[in-house]
Image: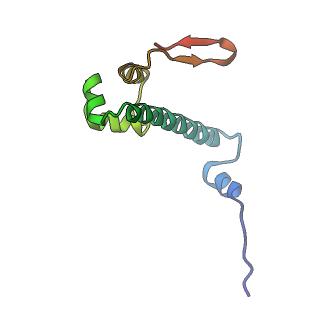
Amino acid sequence: MAQMNLHSFDDYKDELFGKVGTPERDAVEAQLKEEVENYFVGEAIRNARLAQKLTQEQLGEKIGVQRAQISKFEKGKSITLTSMRKIFKALGITTATLDLGNAGKIALW
């Protein structure tokens, strides 16, 4: 019977993205973190829109973009602070702050 070689998921991550602490691995992990954060912003937009029983088209009309753009925002794609401000204001969320840790908090709108 043939010997089976087992590898951990960490071994595969090291092979694909580089060892922990290398520039290549740091870049992959930073990109992944950004994508996850964008996903959560998109989910917040979607949840707020649905809570108000708005369609993507209706929200798009409120901020002057097409439905497809709202769809992208809700998927965490192509979103900027300016777009977030417009969307959340249109949804009645009138204040937001960015927590900068030791540097304090700043108002986004």
- Dividing the picture into quadrants, the one containing residue 91 is top left
Q: Residue at x 54, y 39 (%)?
A: 36
- Residue 108, percent across and down? 49, 14
- Residue 54, percent across and down? 32, 33
Q: Is residue 88 left or right of residue 15?
A: left
Vertically, is 12 above or below 32?
below
Q: Residue at x 39, y 36 (%)?
A: 50
Q: In this view, does 89 lie to the left or right of 9?
A: left
Residue in the foreground of this view, choosing between 34 and 41: 41
- Residue 47, percent across and down? 44, 35
Chosen colour scheme: rainbow
The N terminus is located in which quarter? bottom right
Q: Is residue 46 left or right of residue 54?
A: right
- Count all numbered tags in the image, as a single digit: 0
> Extreme bottom residue here?
1
Residue in the foreground of this view, choosing between 30 and 79: 79
Vertically, is 42 above or below 12?
above
Q: Which residue is drawn at 70% across and 54% down?
A: 10
- Residue 38, percent across and down? 49, 34
- Dividing the picture into quadrants, the one containing residue 23 is top right
Residue in the foreground of this view, choosing between 76 and 15: 76
Q: In this view, does 65 lie to the left or right of 34?
A: left
Residue in the foreground of this view, choosing between 74 and 28: 74
